[in-house]
Amino acid sequence: MIVFRYLSREVLLAVSAVSTVLLVIIMSGRFIKYLAQAAQGVLDPGVLLMIMAYRIPGFLQLILPLGLFLGILLAYGRLYLESEMTVLTATGMSEQRLLSYTMVPALLVALVCAWLSFVLTPQGVQSVAQILNEQDALTEFDTLVPGRFQSMRGGSRVTYTQELSSGRDELQGVFISEKREQRNASSAENAITMLVAKTGRQELQPDGSRYLILQDGYRYDGTPGEADYRVIHYETYGVLLPKPSVEVSVGERETMSTVELIGNPDVKMQSELQWRLSFPILVLIVTLIAVPLSRVNPRQGRFLKLLPAILLYMAYLSLLVAARSALDKGTLPIALGLWPVHGLFLLIGLLLVYWQPIQLRLAQWRAEKETQHA
């Protein structure tokens, strides 16, 4: 029991450390993407933390299997390197018994992955989609940040305001630059319209469209580098406020609950169900693979098998993604689904576990044969 607690603690500590590092790396990259959209005025900065919080379950369901895989390799690799595993083996610890001990924390991780995959991740994706849809309904006026040039419409429009009231209904020192189309194709790309005004306010029309009403300003039309500018002074000028376009790569099936997927006969829905089932299964199979791969010679170092193990894990995950894509396209029967991939790597894991005992028995059999012939 003491050995079991010791091994479980080592594995869980390694899993926690590796998963935390991977989570920080992935979240940092995704946060930078959302932060860039907020800087452009596409997203409200106030919702960034909410979006990241809702995305954590989706990140974790991908990270935990890899974290467990690397955690077992690192934890047991250290034990082999420091000869602790040699001592345990001398006291009767077989690899099968080590595997059974390791399966207990692996089952805990598998249950967490199942909870994330079946419940939390669909809810988080649905919440993120709702937030992004609400952001998509905002206008340029709602996302303006004082003292910052904000690019809209793919960079064809730039808006700036020097001051913005707390109620976001009054602007001071307004500047708007927008590319405009001309009949002359040679100058269409360079033609711009610039608007400057002392003040501005938002006005809502009965049809739901919003306008920025500018007061006491100038409009400049022309092409940079050419002396053909037209300057117009105006007392009141209305500008239609465009809606920011937020890219939402969320499908309907990702937001559906697992119960709804079970009763849905659609091929894509069944593909999504099998994909969610794959994460807890993935945890158990990679545990079966990681335990024999963690066996290293103290002279070789604990990182010798780390790269081949990672490549094997990436091959497993890549085949799952390819099989899921084939299911979506209908080129792979739904009855087979993702199970052949799981079966292949389950077979690889069993071969790795029993390869050494098989070799020992073959060696004993050969020795007995040689003794009989002698």
Image (tube, helix red, strand yellow):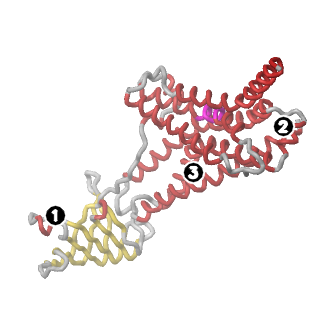
Could you tell me how far apart the alpha carbons at marks 1 and 2 are, in whole angstroms?
73 Å
Q: Residue at x 55, y 54 (%)?
A: 27
Q: Main secondary structure of the magenta part?
A: helix
Within-10-Å neighbours for mark 1: few <14, some 14–19, many 20+: few
The dot on residue 4 is: 2
Q: Which residue is drawn at 62% across and 30% down?
A: 348
Q: Which residue is drawn at 38% across and 26% down?
A: 330
Mark 3 against mark 2, which lies toward the viewer?
2
Determine the secondary structure under disc 1: loop
Quadrant (top left/top right/bottom left/bottom right) for the N terminus: top right
Name the residue that disc number 3 marks.
Answer: 53
| Residue type of the residue flagged with mark 3 | Ala
Which of the pair 60/243 is nearer the observer? 60
Q: Mark 1 or mark 2, which has the lower sequence index?
A: 2
The answer to whether 125 is drawn above or below residue 332 in the figure is: below
Which of the pair 306/280 is nearer the observer? 306
Which of the pair 154/319 is nearer the observer? 319
The magenta span reads 279-285
| Residue type of the residue flagged with mark 1 | Glu
Could you tell me how far apart the alpha carbons at marks 3 and 2 are, in whole angstroms?
35 Å
Which of the pair 322/162 is nearer the observer? 322
Residue lying furthest top in this view? 372
In the rendered structure, are the residues bearing label 1 and label 3 in contact, judged by CB atoms less than 8 Å apart? no
Quarter of the image for residue 287 reads top right
Determine the secondary structure under disc 3: helix
The picture places residue 265, in percent across and down from the top left corner, at: 43, 21
Name the residue that disc number 1 marks.
Answer: 181
The answer to whether 187 is drawn above or below residue 73 in the figure is: below
